[in-house]
Amino acid sequence: MRFALSPGQGENAEGRYLRLAELPALCCQAVGGEPGWADGVTAAWLCFYQAAHLMDSLQDQDEPEEWWAEAGTGVALNAASGLFFTASLLLERLHREPGRGDLAGEIVPEFYRSFFIMCNGQHQELTCPQPSLEQYWRTATEKSGAFFALACWAGTRLATAEASRLANLRQFGEHLGVLIQVKDDLEEFKPGRLPGRALQGRRMGSALPVVYAREVLPERERSRLNAALNHLAEDPHAAVIVNQLVDQSGAGLYLIAELERHRQQALEALYAAKPEAQAAAQLAQLVGSD
């Protein structure tokens, strides 16, 4: 589990991991609480975060991380299971903290409710490899939006019961989660990323640029796109065709517009919560950084 909790490879991955780890504490601070109040919730949330990441990688048959590549998927699955149980035990500690009994009665069920929503989003992604644009956004909201909304809501609830501030910071987290999901999809289109990935066609077929292209391209080009996706594993030129058709569809402009829309909606929700200035500035950076 120690390896599973590492932030991944590269400075960007580590930087993003550390920034997201501050999310519950920053939301707590934003509404007048002490950042340290969120330590237990943050630890549980991060364990769930890494467990969900592992499960997602296994279900998508992504390239394995170094620490479990040789030992196989069983080791990764076992680590994910351990992280789930560790997170649950961390949440249970809330019941034993002085003066936190009522809060625990709200926060712990909200964690599990959010995970049911996430599981539904993951189920939709696994069972609908070629979603419509409407299905994509619904899945992204359930799979990623709900998880980051949870972090923000839980951190906020540790410091206030004010309904409007809870709702606004939950909404901030939801838009942040959708932004992260879209940016992860864009990783699939980096040069050299397509060849050599297991089940690239399935994964790429549900990535937002391809979903948009499939929605707007004429029938002939749409058929070419689907054929290229089906041959990514054995034909390196298929990746070129996919990228050409995605570019032709205007997906780039659409994604820029959607990223900006979610960023603006996240900021509107953040400032509607009337947050403390320092925490607000750090939270705003999360939706404006890569």
Image (cartoon, rainbow, N blue to C red):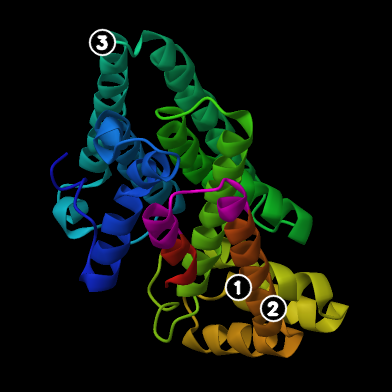
For disc 1, the neighbor class at 10 Å (few under 14, some 14 to 19, many from 20) is many
Q: Is residue 82 left or right of residue 128?
A: left
* Tags 1 and 2 touching, CB below 8 Å: yes
Where residue 282 sits in the image (x, y, percent)?
Answer: 38, 60
The type of residue carrying mark 3 is Pro
Write the residue at 56% across / 75% down: 231
| Of residues 195 and 114, the one drawn nearer to the viewer in this rendering | 114
| Of residues 121 and 48, the one drawn nearer to the viewer in this rendering | 48
Question: Residue 229: which numbered mark, if any?
Answer: 1
* Residue interval drawn in magenta: 269-283
Mark 2 residue element: helix
Check the picture and name the quadrant holding the N terminus. Answer: top left
Mark 1 residue element: helix
Is 275 magenta? The answer is: yes
From the image, tell me which residue sits under label 2.
225
For disc 3, the neighbor class at 10 Å (few under 14, some 14 to 19, many from 20) is few
Q: What is the CA distance from the residue labelled 1 to the residue labelled 3? A: 56 Å
The type of residue carrying mark 2 is Leu
The mark that comes first in sequence, 3 or 2, is 3
Write the residue at 60% across / 73% down: 229
Task: Identify the image quadrant of residue 38.
Answer: top left
Write the residue at 69% across / 86% down: 245
| Of residues 136 and 60, the one drawn nearer to the viewer in this rendering | 136
